[in-house]
């Protein structure tokens, strides 16, 4: 068949016209690109591992259903090693180098506080799903940052309310010597002081401390009835192990602000009876949580841990924000997140507009043997509603 | 707790901590003292030995199997590394060793992460070591007693080998004059490989022994190696006695410092190092340059 010049030009014009009027479903939308500057190595690498695996599961699950608002989800991971200066650098690389404007997965409060002042210049949005320092949504509040997890003051408040009914009067507090630990320690001491109870001693331990024997001697000498622990990561594991070896639990009740499987699994049965706040609990009965646990077990053959659940909740909120905004522009998504409310793995969660702190329940749990795993699991013994534990707007004290 | 009970408790804590520190540091000192190499992979060997030991203990259902394999695996990696790579760099300047041992550190760390994942790992103590002894009515973990006894024994054996055996004589001879020793018919290369392997083996052993206290985790080596370098500075480069005394001094500042001055204990350790170096730049038992 011979095609003459007119025929060719007509065909080309027709093809061009067809392309212009392509239906919307045939056009590919830009992906939702989420930056995750997190602790891949360093002191927080075990937490970083949870964050990364949950991000991957989230992307797999959401993308299989067509994405968010028809957009595929992509994650970009960077290693901060838990260092605030490195976190600023890596976040800057994500934002300025790769044009990723939605950020989550930062672990330590020091890192969060380091990047938050720069969010406005970067025109980026940050969802804090792990960092617990109270000032993040108080003195250090910035409009471009939301906290989707519970704060340290919320958890300290829950434990203090739980102890309000207890006859125990003498408390000793131990925390990691950085933003969140200091904040938690001072908040808890202030709260139990308000209940007429007494702090008989307190100590802040440097990050990376490995031998806690001297601190344990100090605790024993003070003869408290309760030991309040605000530690996480490898330090928490080391402390709880050594406390068990010195039979500290036989002398006093031990309560931890972060009852995390990461720290309690190495204790084995020696951890049974440990109390604390279970920030996320696999057994909490909500439809969203049941589905998350099902997906997680199918993918990783284990129960999701604290930071798996917190990360999933944060990403669920972000996804809903993008869906409602019908946009991936950071500031448009930001507006959609203000006062956003969803049913999440922890029940109802609302990003309170005045300080962008997630309103949610706080669970006090006790480590018990369970048929669901070969190691003790946290069983919820009391649930505190958000109203009971959340500080007033832009406050981190009560 | 009375003052006597307290000091006894802190003293025993000091000895157990010093034991752990010494296991890591004598390996570093051995390698530097004999081969004049500052092994930046020593912390990674500590971590690698811990992970191999944990897996071996789980597989065999036996803590002691883990202990043995922790040492042997780190020694094997050290031997392969020295004979395969380091040996070819002896004629070069010191910066080559710095870079290559740092490279090994990165490779070992990432290989461990790929092989075992990022989660911390633990080992079950045998029943004989899992209890407590009461020292003036205060509980003290049996495992820490074991650390004290094991540490003293291991260091004692090493000292006897270095100071009293023919092998030790050859090692010391090589450290003083490798060419002359070679000219006398000694296989210097083999002795160097053995020395590097033993040094790494001690690191692996130390790593596994630390697991029941702190669990095995990816960053454990980098935290430990900094303390080791401080101890080597205090005790003196290349001095075994210096490593032992340095470990004891650092353990003392940490144990007593964490109790009496918890806000300052880190500072006290570094002040100790600065003080020693001002008084004796070569360390307490090192050679003055």
Image (spheres, coloured by chain):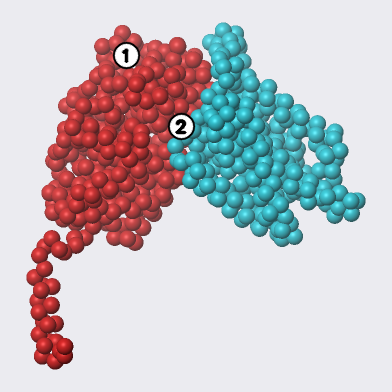
Q: Quadrant of residue B245?
A: top right
Chain B, which colour?
cyan
Residue A88 percent location from the top left of the image: 37, 51
Rendering coords of residue B147 (x, y %): 63, 24
Give the residue at mark 2: A235
Between B151 and A371, which is closer to the camera in this rendering? A371
> What SS does tag 1 mark?
loop
At a point 41% along the width and 48% down the height, the residue shown is A80
* Dot 1 alpha-carbon crowd within 10 angstroms: few under 14, some 14 to 19, many 20 or more: some
- Give the SS element for disc 2: helix
**For residue B127, side relative to residue A290 (left or right):** right
What residue sits right under mark 1 in the picture? A197
Quadrant position of residue A263? top left
Residue sitting at 56 percent across and 39 percent down? Answer: B47
Mark identifier at residue B119: none
Real-space Cα distance between discs 1 and 2?
A: 28 Å
Shown colour of chain A: red
The percent position of residue B201, horizontal first and vertical second, equals: 67, 38
Along the horizontal axis of the image, is A157 left or right of A300? left
């Amino acid at each position: 068949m011979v095609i003459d010049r007119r025929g060719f030009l007509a065909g080309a014009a027709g093809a061009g016209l067809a392309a212009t009027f392509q239906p919307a479903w045939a056009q590919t939308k830009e992906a939702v690109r989420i930056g995750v500057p997190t602790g891949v190595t360093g002191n927080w690498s075990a937490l970083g591992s949870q964050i990364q695996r949950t991000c991957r599961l989230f992307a797999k699950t959401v993308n299989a259903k067509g994405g968010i608002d028809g957009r595929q989800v992509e994650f970009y991971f960077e290693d901060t090693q838990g260092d605030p200066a490195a976190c600023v650098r890596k976040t800057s690389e994500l934002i300025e180098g790769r044009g990723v404007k939605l950020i989550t997965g930062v672990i330590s409060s020091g890192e969060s506080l380091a990047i938050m002042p720069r969010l406005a210049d970067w025109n980026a949005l940050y969802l804090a799903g792990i960092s617990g320092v109270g000032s993040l949504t108080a003195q250090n509040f910035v409009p471009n940052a939301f906290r989707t997890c519970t704060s340290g003051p919320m958890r300290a408040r829950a434990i203090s309310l739980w102890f309000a009914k207890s006859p125990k009067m003498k408390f000793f507090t131990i925390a990691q010597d950085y933003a969140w630990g200091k904040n938690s320690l001072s908040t808890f001491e202030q709260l139990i002081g308000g209940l007429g109870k007494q702090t008989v001693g307190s100590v802040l331990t440097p990050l990376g401390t490995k031998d806690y024997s001297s601190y344990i001697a100090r605790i024993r000498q003070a003869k408290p009835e309760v030991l309040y622990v605000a530690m996480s990561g490898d330090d928490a594991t080391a402390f709880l192990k050594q406390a068990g070896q010195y039979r500290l639990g036989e002398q006093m009740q031990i309560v931890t602000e972060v009852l995390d499987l990461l720290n309690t699994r190495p204790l084995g049965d020696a951890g049974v009876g440990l109390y604390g706040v279970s920030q996320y609990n696999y057994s909490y009965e909500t439809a969203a949580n049941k589905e998350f646990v099902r997906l997680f077990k199918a993918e990783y053959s284990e129960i999701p841990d604290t930071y798996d659940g917190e990360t999933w909740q944060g990403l669920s909120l972000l996804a809903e924000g993008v869906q409602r905004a019908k946009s991936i522009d950071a500031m448009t998504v930001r507006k959609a997140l203000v006062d956003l409310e969803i049913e999440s793995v922890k029940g109802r969660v609302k990003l309170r507009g005045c300080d962008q702190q997630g309103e949610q329940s706080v669970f006090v749990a006790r480590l018990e043997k369970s048929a669901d795993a070969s190691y003790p699991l946290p069983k919820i013994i009391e649930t505190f509603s958000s109203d009971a534990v959340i500080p007033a707007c832009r406050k981190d004290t009560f | 707790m009375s003052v006597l009970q307290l000091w006894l408790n802190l003293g025993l804590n000091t000895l157990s901590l010093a034991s752990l520190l010494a296991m890591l540091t004598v390996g570093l000192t051995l390698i530097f003292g004999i081969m004049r190499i500052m092994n930046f992979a020593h912390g990674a060997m500590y971590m690698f030995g811990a992970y191999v030991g944990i897996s071996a203990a789980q597989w065999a259902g036996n803590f002691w199997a883990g202990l043995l394999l922790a040492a042997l695996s780190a020694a094997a990696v050290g031997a392969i590394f020295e004979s395969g790579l380091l040996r070819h760099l002896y004629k070069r300047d010191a910066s080559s060793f710095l870079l290559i041992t740092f490279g090994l550190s990165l490779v070992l760390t990432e290989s461990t992460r790929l092989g075992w994942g990022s989660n911390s790992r633990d080992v079950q103590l045998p029943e004989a070591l899992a209890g407590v002894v009461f020292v003036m009515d205060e509980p003290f973990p049996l495992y820490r007693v074991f650390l004290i006894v094991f540490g003293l024994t291991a260091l004692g054996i090493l000292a006897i080998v270095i100071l009293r055996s023919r092998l030790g004589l050859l090692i010391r001879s090589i450290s003083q004059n490798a060419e002359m020793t070679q000219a006398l018919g000694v296989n210097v290369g083999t002795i160097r490989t053995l020395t590097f392997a033993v040094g790494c083996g001690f690191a692996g052993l130390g790593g596994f022994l630390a697991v029941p206290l702190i669990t095995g985790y990816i960053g454990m080596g980098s935290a430990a190696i900094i303390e080791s370098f401080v101890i080597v500075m205090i005790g003196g480069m290349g001095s075994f006695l210096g490593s032992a005394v340095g470990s004891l001094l650092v353990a003392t500042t940490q144990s007593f410092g964490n109790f009496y001055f918890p806000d300052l204990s880190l500072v006290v350790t570094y002040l100790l190092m600065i003080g020693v170096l001002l008084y004796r730049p070569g360390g307490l038992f090192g050679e003055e340059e």
